[in-house]
Image: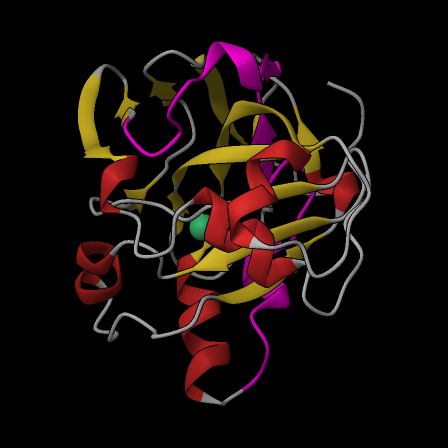
Amino acid sequence: MDRPGKVIAVGRNYAAHARELGNAPPEAPFFFLKAPSTMVGDGDPIVLPFDIEGEVHHEAELAVIIGRKGRRIPAAEALDFVLGYACANDVTARTEQKALQERKLPWFGGKNADSFLVLGPLVPAAAVPDPGALRIRCLVDGAVRQDGTTADMTHGVAALVSHASRRLTLHPGDVLLTGTPAGVGPLRPGETVEVAIEGVGRIRNPVVLEERPA
Ligand code: MN
C-alpha cells in the first residue's frame, strides 16, 4: 500500500505479551506513534542499524486501515470507519526500548528506524467479517515464534478505533497497529521473518545488517 498517514500503535494489548515483558496489562489502551516513513512492504529487507544496542524483536500485528474521517467515533460505529486490514510487523529495538522505559522516557527511539514497520497489502473490510477472531502467527526461518488469536486482544478493533479518535481526528489512510500476542523474540541478520494472519494474508521479509560507513 501507499505510505500511510499517521501510524498509531497500541502497547500491551494482549495480556500474555504484557506479562512476558514484566508488565501489567493496562486498563485503558495506550498508544505510541511510528513515523509513516518507517514503512516497508512485503519482501523488503528489515535493516538493523549497525549501531543498535542489544536485541531487535518481531511483533506480529493486525493493522487496521482507516477509510473515513472521524473524531470521537462511538465503538458501535467504529467498524464503519475501517477500510480494510493488513498484516504488520511492528519491529522493535527491545533493549533500547527497555532502557528508555527504565529512564521514564518515551518509546519513540525503540520503535522508529527505517524499515521498522512492515505493512502488507490491504484486504477490504468486507472480506474480514470478524477481525476479533483471526489466528495470528509469526515465523522466523519457518519456526513458529508467535501463535495467537486476535480474540485475545484486551481492547478489540472497535474499541481501539474509538479510543484513538477521542482526541485526534482519524483520516483515510491512517493506520492502527493493534498489538502483538506473546512470543516476541530477536531477529538476526540472515533470517527471514514472516507474519501470517488467517484471512488477511502473509508478509515475508529478510533481515539484514546496515553496512557500517567506511
Ligand atoms: Mn507492537
Residue at the front extreme, as displayed: 76
Query: Which of the two residues, 42 or 164, is positioned nearer the viewer here?
Result: 164
Answer above or below: position of 52 versus 182: below
Q: Is residue 121 magenta?
A: yes
Query: Which of the two residues, 123 or 114, is positioned nearer the viewer here?
Result: 123
Residue drawn 17% across the image and 21% down it = 143
| Location of the N terminus (image quadrant) | top right
Q: Locate residue 146 relative to residue 10 in the image: left or right.
A: left
Q: Which residues are magenta?
A: 105-133
Q: Is residue 213 magenta?
A: no
Answer above or below: position of 32 versus 128: below
Q: Locate residue 119 relative to residue 152 in the image: left or right.
A: right
Q: Residue 6 in the image: x percent, y percent?
A: 76, 48
User: Quarter of the image holding residue 214?
Assistant: top right
Q: How many marks?
A: 0
Residue 23 shows up from this direction: yes
Residue at the bottom extreme, as displayed: 103
Q: Residue 23 in the image: x percent, y percent?
A: 26, 74
Q: Residue 181 in the image: x percent, y percent?
A: 27, 44
Residue drawn 38% across the image and 53% down it = 55
Q: Residue 194 in the image: x percent, y percent?
A: 37, 20
Residue drawn 33% across the image and 34% down it = 132
**Colour scheme of this structure image?**
secondary structure
Query: Which of the two residues, 78 or 43, is positioned nearer the viewer here?
Result: 78
Q: Locate residue 146 relative to residue 172 in the image: left or right.
A: left
Residue drawn 50% across the image and 89% down it = 104
